[in-house]
Each structure stands twice: as C-alpha cells, then as structure tokens.
Amino acid sequence: MTTNINSLRVHVGSVVPRILRGGSTSKVRSLRVGSKLLCSRRDLATMTLSSSSSELDSKLPPDVAEVVQKYVQKPQTPASLQTLMRTGRGELLKKTYRESEMQDTAATELILMQVAGFLRREIPIRLAHRIQDLDRVPLMGDMPSVEAVRDIYISSFMELVDQPKIGNPEQEEEFAMKLQTIYEKHSNVLIQMAKGAFELRAAVRNGEIKGTTGRRMKFDEMDGCHSFLDRFYMSRIGMRVLVGQYIALRQPPMENFVGMICKETSPYEIVHNAVEDAKFMCDRKFGDSPEVIISGRKDLTFSYIPDHLHYILLELLKNALRATVETHGVDSDFPPVEVIIAD
C-alpha cells in the first residue's frame, strides 16, 4: 500500500517483514531520537568512552557474558507474516511432527507446541543480540535507565535459556505462562529507553560528556547511539510480534484473524480511524485541523496486523496535519491533506 500525504509518498507494507527478519536495520530512518543517526568516526575516535573500549570493558557478569556470547553466535531465523499465518493455520506441522504424532494429538495443541518450540530457540538468540548491543553501545549504555533495560533483558534471557524442551501440552502451557510474564515485564521498556535518551541528551547539553580533544559534543551528531536505537526498537517490535502472535493463538479464535494477523485488513477503515484520532489531537493542540480526503482503492484488503498499520498511519497523519497548520498559520484556510490508497 502507498500513502500519499501532501505530496509525501511513503511505502507502508514492508515494515513488519523487515523487522521480523531480525537483521540489520541501518537503512531504517523512521524511529529516531534526533535528526540523524549517533557518532561520526571522528567523534568515536575522540570519545573518552569509545565503542572498542566498551567491548573490552563489558559490564556483564562473566557467567552471563559467556552464555550471551554462545547465543550471539547462533543465526537469527527469518519469519515473515506469511510464515506466521501458515504456522498458525497448521500448514507447516509436517515440518516438525510425524504422521503418527499428528494423528494422536489435536491439531491446535500441535500448532501451539510447534510455535512454542520455535520461540524457545529463537527468542534467547534475539535477546542475546540486544544484550550485547546494550552492553557495547558507547555512552548511552552508561545511562541509568538503559542499564535498567539491560538488566530486564538479562533476566528474561536467563529464564529462557534454562527452559527445557517442550514435548507435551502441559509443558507448552507452562512455557506460555512464563513467556506471558516476560512479555508484560518488557511492556515498559520503550519508556525506559526514552528516559535513557533524555538522560544522554541532558548530559551532552550540560557539557558532562566531551571528546578527548575537549570539543563539545552534539547529541544529533552521535550516529552510533542513534543507529543503536534503530536496531533496538526494530528488533523489539519483531520479538513482540513473534511472542504476541503466539499468545494470540492461545486465545479463542476471532473471525478473519490468525492470531493477531487479520486476513482482511482494510486500509480504508484503518485510515478513517487514524484520521479521526489525528484530527482530535490537532484540534486539541491548535484549535483547528485541515480536512483529510481519502481516495483510491477503498475496497482493498490484505493480511496485516491492524494495530501496527494504525500506528504507522496515525504518525504520518499527525505529522501532515501539524505541518499543514504550522506552514499556513492557525487562522488560514488550510489545503486538504490527501491520503491515496493504491495497489
């Protein structure tokens, strides 16, 4: 789907597939804290705490560092939305179970055991990569809020690496309860990371952090930290999609849904709801808001996670409405904001 907002064309359909792969996100620019990504090579070379020294001076306990290093060396497994849907429908059971096992056990139980077995292997690997990143990121890793996040990740990681293999529905249910607790424990991580970014920004502005040459650093120039935040947030979304899908599969089924994925997501309905939310926020801030015109394929549907698409479109619309009001002035006749739904 392509959204055209005041001549700004943005492709929305590739976000979740990319984050589920768990790979590099250095090209992603939508989840930033500043106007750039964090430390140029020149700045890194002159920092009191460089990335190389950070790697040598790990803050992890030796026993934890050893286990983390073991899992970091394992490859992360790509998982597309299509794969999640096929797994949720039981189409990939033959990859895990023999015919005799499939005859003796209910399909729903086999699906949950298959997904749980995958998450038991995959989530510790992804957590290990994030723990290593949290441990090595220069400067930001020393912020109290970021240290608290690292402790949460270490705690969850150590819980999961001790998880025995899942061979029956009782073990699957026990694993699900553990994963649900971890899922909820990580719900506050976004706020903690934002606090960490503000702590670093304040330290930079107050001159508490300087290069070895004495040059005052600027938060917006710290490309290494911004790049770290991109990787961290994208990886977090990927993990929460994997775990959230598993938790949703354990709930009573909903029409047109496979877990948290809707088979008939309507971009028109989601845009319509996002417009109402964005206009409400714009009215509350400026006292008025531009008209939003939705055109194109209003009948289009596809498989996607509705909440994620709503969040993406809401952010785009908030930016478009605010920019329109600020550009033309509060008492002006605003040009409409156009949203075009295309194939």
Image: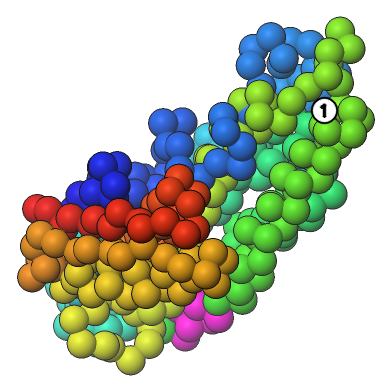
Residue 158 visible in the displayed image? no
Q: Is residue 113 left or right of residue 94?
A: right
Residue name at image x 83 percent, y 19 percent: 216
The quarter of the picture where residue 54 lies is top right
Residue name at image x 36 percent, y 62 percent: 290
- Residue 171 part of the magenta-drawn span: yes
- Look at label 1 and name its amino acid: Asp
Residue 15 visible in the displayed image? yes
Residue holding disc 1: 57
Q: Is residue 207 left or right of residue 110?
A: right
Residue name at image x 48 percent, y 52 percent: 329
Q: Nearer the viewer, residue 73 or 1?
A: 1
Q: Nearer the viewer, residue 327 or 139?
A: 327
- Residue 241 part of the magenta-drawn span: no
Up/down of 74 relative to 302, above or below:
above
Given the current orientation, which residue lies at the most extreme bottom position?
252
SS majority, magenta: helix
| Residue 111 x %, y % | 29, 75
Q: Nearer the viewer, residue 182 or 41?
A: 41
Badge 1 crowding class, 10 Å Cα cut-off, few under 14, some 14 to 19, many 20 or more, is few
| Residue 236 x %, y % | 52, 54
| Residue 249 x %, y % | 34, 79
Up/down of 68 relative to 238, above or below:
above
Q: Which residues are magenta?
A: 170-177
Up/down of 41 relative to 307, above or below:
above
Q: Nearer the viewer, residue 212 or 148?
A: 212
Look at the numbered disc 1 and give the secondary structure of its residue.
Answer: loop
